[in-house]
Image (cartoon, rainbow, N blue to C red):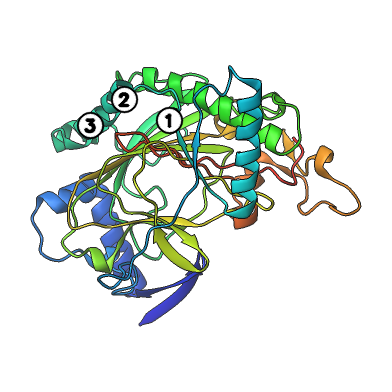
Amino acid sequence: MVATSNTGGEVQEVVIKPVNAWKSDLRAFDDSKAGVKGIADAGLAKIPEIFVSNPNKHQEKPGSSRLINVPVLDFGGVDEDATLHKEIVEKVRDASERLGFFQVVNHGIPSGVMEEAMDGIRRFHEQDAEAKKQFYSRDNTKSCVYNSNFDLYQVPTVNWRDSLYCVMAPNHPDPEELPQYSDHVMRLGLTIFELLSEALGLEPDHLKKVHCAEGLFIIGHYYPACPEPELTCGLSSHTDSGFLTLLLQDHIGGLQVLHEDKWVDVPCLTGALLITNDRFKSIYHRVLAKSVGPRISLPSFFRTHFVEGTESRSYGPMKELLSEENPPAYKDAPIPERDRWRPSTVTFQVVIQEATEFLFLPLFWVYNYQF
């Protein structure tokens, strides 16, 4: 039996096994605690059925894939030159409203810090399987866990990746390489929040005052080489929840965005920002499975719902941006309800890249929200 679902502008077909058999396969995979890397290490020529979606859906025909021409903004001197600062704000606004994303260079994070963070993620995933199992969990209240597919039991098909999840703010755990990296990410995030505030016509500290930078959640994704990449996906089409996401990735590539109803590759450039939402367009993105690898990426999410005591906060349209011509587009909602939403009209995304392929995908509910 074949079923279809619409996710991020694309129809996804999956082969449906009897429910009990499918659940049994999922449970066996989960109980192994070896993740996708365990399957890859076994040297299988074909991927297990739980990973199979519509054949030929994910990969483009040879020669048909295309790169998108993404604006590149230089953040060098953004805090030192008032005229330059104003120019950058204007470029942020223009790119966000017209195209929906842009790239940034000279973001201030040293290449050595990024390399150490990426090496740390690689070492974790490539250590002995038994050593990793002590971190394997689906308890999302823990500050540091490892698993494969956080939504394993809720999705129609499993993605080809493993992940290490670390809550880095307000209190970070023990990983040796990540604290220094997360400190740099926090500083850069604050700069981006200021530019976004000004691009919306608000005071520079507006988004900081409404608690956008309180919580920081970092994920270390590991995408092993896949024997049948055309049959599965590394990360399915989606928009992120939260305020801002900064993504660091290696040279393997595979990140795509949905632009003008077509999937296009995001080029590996030095420094990059990708921004979206209602007024600042929101785009779906995904990661293809690859026959080469592993691919390693390190997204950092600014998400206040990881901060204790925020459950009572209510989020709604920014009053400063409302008028008779621009009435509220969304209702007020508390954080737990807000976090369950995944509409493309309420996500803000930024991508940043460095010589070591540093990508950022920041997201944020802006255009029509009051905090």
Q: SS class of the residue under badge 3? A: helix
Figure disc tally: 3
Callout 2 amino acid:
Ser
Label 2 residue SS: helix
Quarter the N terminus occupies: bottom left
Q: CA distance from mark 2 to mark 3?
A: 20 Å
Q: CA distance from mark 3 to mark 1?
A: 18 Å
In the rendered structure, find residue 103 and report the number of the disc placed on it: none
Tell me the residue at 25%/68% (across/down): 230
Q: List the residue tagged with mark 3.
A: 124
Q: Can you give x and y, in whole percent of width and height, for residue 236 in the image?
A: 40, 58
Relative to 289, is 262 on the left or the right? Answer: right
| Whether residue 343 is visible | no
Residue under the point 36% across and 71% down: 19
Q: Which numbered dot is residue 142?
A: 1
* Amino acid bearing label 1: Lys
Of circles 1 and 2, the one toward us is: 2
The amino acid type found where label 3 is placed reads: Phe
Earlier residue among tags 2 and 3: 2
Q: Which residue is mark 2?
A: 111
Q: Residue furthest left?
A: 43
Q: Earlier along the polypeptide chain: callout 1 or callout 2?
A: 2
